[in-house]
Image (cartoon, helix red, strand yellow):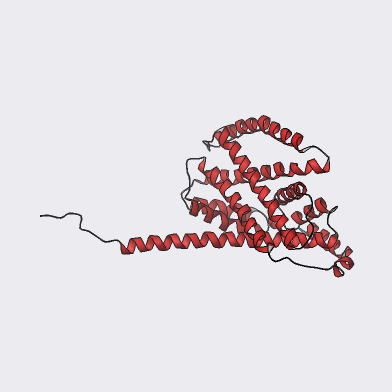
Amino acid sequence: MAATGFVVVRYTAHNWEQMKGYSWQMDWVWVPAAVVTMSVFFLGLAIGWRSVVAWHDTALPWNSSLWVWVRSSFTRYLPTPIWAIASRIYLTTQLGVPWRVAAFSLAGELVGSIGGAFAIALLAVSLWFSISTLFLIAGVVGSVVVILPIAYSCSLSLTRRFNVLPSCSLYGLAGWSAQYAITFAVFGVANILVLKSLGFNVPPINLILGVSALAWAIGTLNVFSPSGLGTREIILALGLGSYLPPPELLAFGIGSRLAAVFGELFLFSCIYLVKSINQWKASNVTNGSPSFPENISP
């Protein structure tokens, strides 16, 4: 964390003169779109986690499962991932899910999110190494066809050993993997909207999608940085340094982080509102239902 902070401060100090003389502008029309798209990204992560729980024949109600995910996700901003792990397992077990299943679902979410992020990050390869998009897609599909069955069989043997056996078909696993890949494509679209809201020129779309996904994956793997703080922004700067000047790189890193925070808060507010409405409807039905005697004798 300290090393990441040092790099950010040094980069800012080195380019301070350019930043002072830069003409800043905002296109506020794109700001709500960026925040809402970030919310859709977090919703995709929550749905992916719920799918892993459902593999163990313990499907949770949509509102309850999303409420658990969004509450525990805020602990990512605390130092070390132990708080996020503990809160997710605790809140999930409060819904009647065994702790082994809760722990397995958290590991499944981590594997799915990192795998989906790296799958989308391969889109950047077509630009960096001048590989045709068709050849790249064929390579990704071929790799999935070979690697997915191997990963599936290995996971089955591991889960049998720990007495946590998911009931998921190979097709279901493929759909789950694709859902995570689409989720990280949405994250890239959200960053494109952040760039447009800042009034910057947008780099090639496949590059911004790939770099955004790679930045999230590496930020997640850096367990010493709360929610990948600093790490994600450094990867974005390294990947887009050839297309954006230093002032824009710094502003984009901050803007992407703020859009993610407000997007998560927006998702939290929506889930809380739906939960409150459902509770209000349930209380009205209970309080307003007529009572009839069980036995009526003539």
* Residue 52 image point, x, y percent: 55, 43
Q: Please tell me whether residue 115 is drawn above or below residue 152 in the rendered image.
A: below
State which quadrant residue 18 falls in. Answer: bottom right
* Residue 4 image point, x, y percent: 79, 57
Residue occupying the point 49% across, 60% down:
274
Q: Please tell me whether residue 97 is drawn above or below residue 35 in the rendered image.
A: above
Q: Is residue 10 left or right of residue 80?
A: right
Q: Quadrant of the N terminus?
A: bottom right
Q: Is residue 97 left or right of residue 254?
A: left
Instruction: Report if residue 194 is visible in the image.
Output: yes
Q: Nearer the viewer, residue 127 or 16?
A: 127
State which quadrant residue 175 falls in. Answer: top right
* Residue 196 image point, x, y percent: 74, 59
Residue occupying the point 27% across, 61% down:
290
**Number of numbered discs present?**
0
Q: Nearer the viewer, residue 50 or 72?
A: 50
Residue occupying the point 75% across, 49% down:
205
* Residue 127 image point, x, y percent: 81, 43
Instruction: Report if residue 75 is visible in the image.
Output: no
